[in-house]
Amino acid sequence: MLGRVLCTVLFVGALPSPAGASQGHISVVLLGANGDLAKKYLWQGLFQLYMDQVSSGHSFTFHGAALAALEPGQRLMFDVLKKLSCPPGEAPNRCAVLKDQFLKLSQYHQLGSAEDYRALNREIETLLGQEGLQEAGRIFYLSVPPFAYTEIAGHINSSCRPRAGAWLRVVLEKPFGHDLQSAQQLAAELAGFFSEEEMYRVDHYLGKQAVAHILPFRDQNRQFLGPIWNRHHVERVEVVLKETVDAKGRTRFYEQYGVIRDVLQNHLTEALLFLIMELPANASSAQELVQRRLQALQALWGLQRSSAVLGQYQAYDSQVQQELREARGHVSTTPTFAGVLIHSQSPRWEGVPFLLTSGKALDERVGYARVLFKNRAYCPQSGTLRDAGHSQCKPKQIIFYFGHGALGAPAVLVSRNLFQPVMPKDSWREAGARSDLHLFGQPLSDFYVYSPVRERDAYSVVISNIYHGRKDFFIPVENLLASWAFWTPLLDSTSRQPPRLYPGGVENQQLLDFEMVPGGLAFTLAEPAELLHPGGQGPSDFRAVRSQFRQSPLVSAWAEELIARLASDMEEAAVRSVARSGQFHLALSGGSSPVGLFQRLARHHYGFPWQQSHVWLVDERCVPLTDSESNFLGLHRHLLQHVRVPYFNIHPMPVHLNRRLCVEEDGGAQLYAQDIAALVANASFDLVLLGVGTDGHTASLFPRSESGLEGAATVLLTESPAKPHQRMSFSLPLINRARQVFVLVLGKGKHDITTLLSRVGHEPRKWPISGVSPSSGQLVWYVDYEALLG
């Protein structure tokens, strides 16, 4: 039957072939023919291919395949095929004829067992023999979960390869693995069945018209871009995909992958590479383009945990509980929003920030790649008196607009104060000016705007590229593994990081705003966000609040972000104190934990009022101040020598008197107590910074010690179980007189004591830190995620 249909189609008079015989027959097999992707995009893309190529000289048959039995599977498939549409502008009569032919050339097959594949192969071979057709090739489009790839690949390889001389193209949909190791395993398994030339790994974003035009745009505008497409002129590059929908109905997939694996590792990375790769002299060489993309990927600096900010919309947990039948208290750390800062070590881009951002349940649906240029101009003349569109003081940018959003369609936009670009007139046309639309705060009239002459769905472009064998628009295995090698360290380091909660949509307000800080990214609003009513009253119940630990405020984040927050809070406390009393008395603990804090205060907090600050030590080891074990020496190296604290405002503990160390008769502790009483009003420090030992000690107050926990003494000598044993320390009563006490707890090694402290009460003889409770001040805990979560 199909043979007679094919013969009829080949010789329909209204659709003549070019002069000469057929160029060969192509069999297209779509596995997963009744899945969501096939229903929404793939069948329409195959129909578009047929419409475009029906007169090319090739003949086609289309084989939909799935696990469902013949009758129900065929019924479902043809329900989809009957709804296929022609593009605007297609003559109705021609559209009707082509659609009818396409349906007649399409068949459904149940493909599961090896015998099913052998039967499909026999049917194709029989058709070729009956019609006397030469086989050009076969396309197998695997729109199935990746776990099925290996079994299907084995069946295709053993039972369904085309005749000698014909090509085979096996199309694979993402995800290609979950991390570097799984991607390597999948690649090795598939390489046992197919050559790299036969595999087409799809990233449909490379089929989006604005993305696909990045390289042609760069090539055709070399004369303008050559001098400015580099670190000296580009301020930053942004690649963004925002979605208004959430993950409802897809949480099983999303729990495995999250936003970074779903969008950033593939779509946004590939678009970024098109922007930053070195353009070969011959931009039409597919092999050179693929190689330059790989080189650009390999030149990216490695990602750290601080390179990203992560979020999760508030309803996600309840959706996971409902769809995956998780317990009511289940908490997911899967991010649904991510912003990632990337840098390149290439000479062209060194120092230029690349920002990749994507999320679900955001305020708008839009995607774009934006190159923002530095602006060195100063314009004294009023903007109302000049040609606004060409003003050198306006932002200069080039935007590849993927679609949706304010424009509602793909576009390429170039600021008028840059240059008028060269664009191919057969495929892109200049859009009319619209004064009612604004983009990034600018009226659309500030841009040269170009839109496609004919809009095409991304999958139609992808399928056309498969037909034409355009390998440069697919992901080679080497590039795939390089991408996973780049992203996997970040995925591993953030796998247990609690994301910031956000309510979704316009209610997000500024919660997801982030900024570049030394070492990476940080949310602009530093307070952790949580829902006031976990039962879920709706987005209006969402606002930023502090968490609690031992009935006191808790600030938690990864170590770098936590230290940045602590340093900012210390500066704020210092500024307030100086405004109130003209001075700031700060007492600091020693050890390794605060080293990063000291360095940050020295390098990034130029507004800190050091001239009005007095720096004291909470405790000291009984060693000379020049000894590497000395708390004061560490404080001096990492902080004091880098800031302008008046010499007479620095107060080291007098542990070395009369050429002796911490001898009771020398009265060093009493001398320090007298200095405090003379200089610190009511012996009440403005801020005391403490740490916590794994045994629960703080300052140099250790478990089972009888001294320093109560009484009148403010400074005393103590004994440590670790060397050096002798110490000098503040007492608990002195610490508890402070206006503010900040406790810094860092590292996985502190997880056990942190957990213990969350459960015990006021027992300073067992755990001295539990006795810290300012009588009229505030205690704040700064605990990083490793200490908090392990």
Image (cartoon, rainbow, N blue to C red):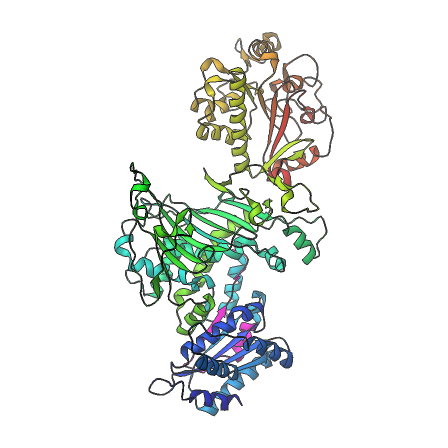
Q: Residue at x 47, y 83 (%)?
A: 97
Residue appearing at x 61%, y 13% in the figure: 683
Using the rendered image of the protein, determine whether residue 630 is visible from the camera's viewpoint. Answer: no
**Number of residue marks:** 0
Q: Quick check: is 766 in the magenta stretch?
A: no
Q: Nearer the viewer, residue 539 or 276?
A: 539
Task: Return the x and y of residue 388 as percentages of the image width and height.
Answer: 32, 46
Q: 660 above or below 12?
A: above
Relative placement, left or right, of 223 versus 260 is left
Q: Is residue 646 above or below residue 247?
A: above
Is residue 698 in sight in this rendering? yes
Q: Is residue 158 above or below residue 514?
A: below
Residue 176 drawn in magenta: yes
Name the quadrant of the N terminus: bottom right
Residue that protrudes farthest toward the left in the picture: 223
Quadrant position of the C terminus in the picture: top right
The image position of residue 250, as x and y in percent, is 61, 59
* Residue 562 place in picture, x, y as percent: 55, 35
Report the magenta residues as a range: 152-180
Which residue lies at the image location 58% right of the left edge and 11% below the top edge?
Answer: 668
Instruction: Tell me residue 112's x, y (percent).
Output: 61, 76
- Residue 292 vertical position relative to residue 729 in the rendered view, above or below: below
- Of residue 199 and residue 217, the one placed in the foreground of this image is 217
Name the one closer to the observer, 495 or 724: 495
Q: Quadrant of residue 706?
A: top right
